[in-house]
Every structure is written in C-alpha cells, then in structure tokens.
Amino acid sequence: MITLNKDGGLVRYEDWSAIQSLPGYVQDLDPSQHKLESIVGRYAEKEEVRCGLSNCHTPHQRGYVVRTEDGHVTNIGKDCGRTYFGVDFETMSRKLDRDIEDAENRERLWSFSFHADEVDGQILNIRREQRGADWVHAGVQLLTTRSRGCPDPIVDRVTAMVKVRGNTLTMQRQLTEREIEELEAALAGSPGQHSDRRLPRPQYREEPIATIDGFSALYPENNLRELLVLDLEKRLQDFRMVDINSLISSELRRWVRWVNSVDSACERAREIVDDGRRLLTSTNLRPLATILKNADDKATFRTFLNTLPSAH
C-alpha cells in the first residue's frame, strides 16, 4: 500500500508505478548533493524495493517518499532517512505518520457515522426483543437484590455463589454415625494422625444438589444495563454530537477504539442475553427452593418462579 500526500489530501495506491510516475522521480539520488524539503508519502510493500539513494540501494519493504529542495523525488527506508537527513527527516516522518493516522481515523469515524442508526436499531432490538436484555436484567436484579421479589435467603445464596464464581448449588448434610466412623478410620490411616482420634459430633458435609445453568449472566462484568445503556447507547448519543473534522489526534484515537469495540460489545450482549434466558427458567432455578425453611419464603419463591418460562 502506498499513501501519498497530494494537495493537502491523502491518496492511496496499490501499484509501485504511482511513485515512479511522480514528477522528478529518480532511482539514484546522491544525499550529499541534495537537501530534504518534504516527505510526500510512505509505503509498505509485499515485495522488497530498492532504496533510491545512490550510496545505499538496500532492499526493503517499508519506507518513505521524499522530495528535495531542487525538485527531485525518490524512495528511502527509515534508517536511511535518519542517517542522511537527520532531525528534519525525523520531524517530517512523524508528522506524516500522524497525518495519515488522523486521516484514516477520520475516515473510520465518518464511515461509522453513516451506520449509527443501524447500530441504534441493533441495540434496541437486543434490549426489547421477547425475553431480551431488559427482561434478563430485571430478572437478574430480582435474584441478586434483597427485598426486590425473591426471598432474602435465595438472594444471599446466589450472591455467595457469584462471589466464588461457582454455579453448583450445595446443601449441608449431617453425617451418619457410620460415615463419621469411616472418616475417623481414614484419618487414622493418614501420616501423622493418631489412631485413636475421635471427631466431635455432629459432623456435616457440603454436598452438591444441582447445577444452575447460565450462571455467568449474574456476574458483575455482565451487567446488561451498563453494557447496553450506559456504554453503547450513551456513547452513541455523545458520538452524534462530535464534530469529526475538528477532533485532535488523541480524541480521534479514543473514538476509533470505541467504534471498533461496538460490534464485539453487541455480540457479547447477545451472549449474555442467551445465558440469562437459560438462567431464568423455573426448571433451572427451582432447586434453590431446597435451601428455604420459612413457609412464607417458599410461597414468595413459588410466585417468582411462576413468572418465568418453564424452559429456555
């Protein structure tokens, strides 16, 4: 790819002849006889090209197109430019690189701006489709916020499971006398244990009773409101107010990073919604009822389950 700065605008070419056809182009330029005036372009070629300096001609793939004060034009690698034209070359090449980056970033932002309404539509669809992001977010809030519709013991257990990133529901069971004796025998056979060790009674063990599907929808980093409303929708509104042509380099880079993240953010939101749909079914969440002792809590949880579909 060849990028030339022509009349204050950047033009891209694929063919090397674009450089060779420039007025004043020479293949053998003596740097000791010419003074650098400007850098008019840069290139990155698949095949190696020869340096245009008469005392070099080293093959390379990346370089710059320079013009001298007397109108000659040639192509040189970055190392040659620094060696033979010094600080002037460094300053000019950095400016050209920045100008090209800025121009490419502006093009990216303008291109995105023409499709902003489509992105808005995608976000709205993800949020408001049947059992979409808004529905999932509301259900997640009920499961993770006290006094919002689920019994507090359910909320506390779900919150604890989220904290350890575990989707296995466990329940404490009291061991039988025989199980305790077997445990004592096993401990007696372990190195460094006394053979007459007796464990206190009663003894309990945490045992798995169910696996909750789609549990990652509950993780804090998968908050759909933050992802879709506070990031995508809010930033899209802010973007529409931006004057792209007046943005400075740092602002261009910042907006391009965000624009380039939009598609992946939408895809991630869809994946979270899918996890949420698997999570928020009465069949999937019913095992949580086993931890409830209070009759009112059980009734409240049944009411909550009745609002959910039976399956994904």
Image (spheres, rainbow, N blue to C red):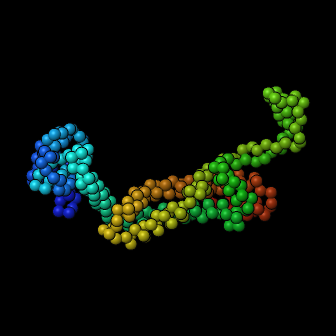
Q: Position of residue 26 (x, y in %)?
A: 10, 47
Q: Is residue 117 left or right of residue 213?
A: left
Q: Position of residue 72 (x, y in %)?
A: 11, 52
Q: Is residue 287 left or right of residue 270?
A: right
- Residue 52 position (above or below residue 262): above
Q: Is residue 241 visible?
A: yes
Kindly indicate the quadrant of the structure image that contains residue 301: bottom right
Task: Looking at the picture, tell me which residue is in the foreground, 31 or 280.
Answer: 31
> At 24% from the left edge and 50% from the top edge, which residue is drawn?
86
Q: Is residue 298 left or right of residue 239?
A: right
Q: Is residue 33 left or right of residue 178?
A: left
> At 13% from the left edge and 45% from the top edge, which residue is drawn?
30
In the picture as drawn, the residue positioned furthest to the front comes out as 32
Q: Position of residue 304 (x, y in %)?
A: 68, 62
- Residue 273 position (above or below residue 167): below
Q: Is residue 306 visible?
A: no
> At 42% from the left edge and 70% from the top edge, which residue is drawn?
238
Instruction: Indicate the quadrant containing the C terminus: top left, top right, bottom left or bottom right.
Output: bottom right
Task: Looking at the picture, tell me which residue is in the foreground, 130 or 237.
Answer: 237
Callout count: 0
In the picture as drawn, the residue positioned furthest to the bottom comes out as 241
> At 43% from the left edge and 70% from the top edge, which residue is drawn?
237
Q: Position of residue 108 (x, y in %)?
A: 32, 60
